[in-house]
Amino acid sequence: MYSQKIEITFGAFNNRHLQMAKLDELQDIVTQTRRDILRMVHKVNSGHPGGSLGCTEFMVALYNEIMDLKEGFDMDGIGEDLFFLSNGHISPVFYSVLARKGYFPVEELSTFRLINSRLQGHPTTHEGLPGVRIASGSLGQGMSVALGAAQAKKLNGDDHLVFSLHGDGELQEGQNWEAIMYAAGNGIDNLISTVDRNGKQIDGPTSEVLPMGDIAEKFRAFGWDVLEIENGNDLEEVIAGLNEAKSRTGKGKPVGIIMNTEMGNGVDFMMHTHAWHGKAPNDEQLEKALAQNPETLGDY
């Protein structure tokens, strides 16, 4: 398996003490995001905690350390980096990170999946929720949207990047591979697409539902530059991997990240199983899960 040890860089934070202070700050957001996810799906007894918990470090790092974002939100996204969530069922982590970043009030998280809420089970656009640029939930479509946005940026002379996130089981959808082929064939080298490789999907292990083989080598065969994050639940390693990916853009190839995560990470009884892909905790399970993730920034 291809792997590479990547030294961590925190943008302008060259002093190690400052780096650790920043890391501690981000870790607090990670812990609070986990609490948000658990409380959201528990309240309505519906949602997808497993993948959300597994991608928490990635999403927190992306929005709070990696992407170049401008003040305010508009659908055009000109002059800033863009993110597209393809595996839209992990909306709880997306909503929490957006709220904690200031896109909309944290208190609105309490409306998750309620009638007339802007925070539906899968992100949509007609409610006008800041931070959401596409409706996602029909798996396999996010890559196409992301590369289209990336190509538009190149045509407009906008040197910002486009990021996307995909599930490994989602790659069983054929449209992904058309998009992957198109991106490399057209030199879309301002695109960084990350695959959350947790090895699980709603019906069981991906190895049993439909084996994916060597995903990294598949991307390389299609003409991508690929790196791997060995532990996508290690915040420091995630930041290092994303910074390395950024350094590889602009060189003629789209950049792919294969990120190994644990579904349900941070809650011991949700880990090492696909059972919590789309299952909400009951009252007792919620209290046990929250006890493993003490409050850091204040609940909504």
Image (spheres, grey):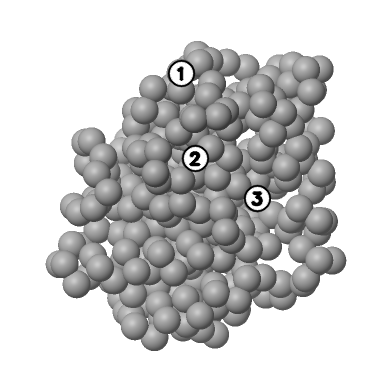
Q: Quadrant of residue 190?
A: bottom left
Q: Residues within 10 Å of mark 1 (few under 14, many from 20)?
A: few
Q: Secondary structure at mark 3?
A: loop
The circle drawn on residue 94 is 2
Q: The residue under label 2 is which amino acid type?
A: Phe
Q: The residue under label 3 is which amino acid type?
A: Thr
From the image, state whether disc 3 or disc 1 is nearer to you: 1
Q: CA distance from mark 1 to mark 2?
A: 15 Å
From the image, state whether disc 1 or disc 2 is nearer to you: 1
Q: Residues within 10 Å of mark 3 (few under 14, many from 20)?
A: many
Q: Which residue occupies 18% across, 62% down?
A: 158
The circle drawn on residue 107 is 1
Q: Is residue 222 left or right of residue 208?
A: left
Q: Residues within 10 Å of mark 2 (few under 14, many from 20)?
A: many
Q: Secondary structure at mark 2?
A: helix
> Does residue 6 appear in this view?
no
> Does residue 86 appear in this view?
yes
Quick check: 232 above or below 106? Answer: below
Q: Which residue occupies 33% across, 47% down?
A: 67
Q: Quadrant of residue 286?
A: top right
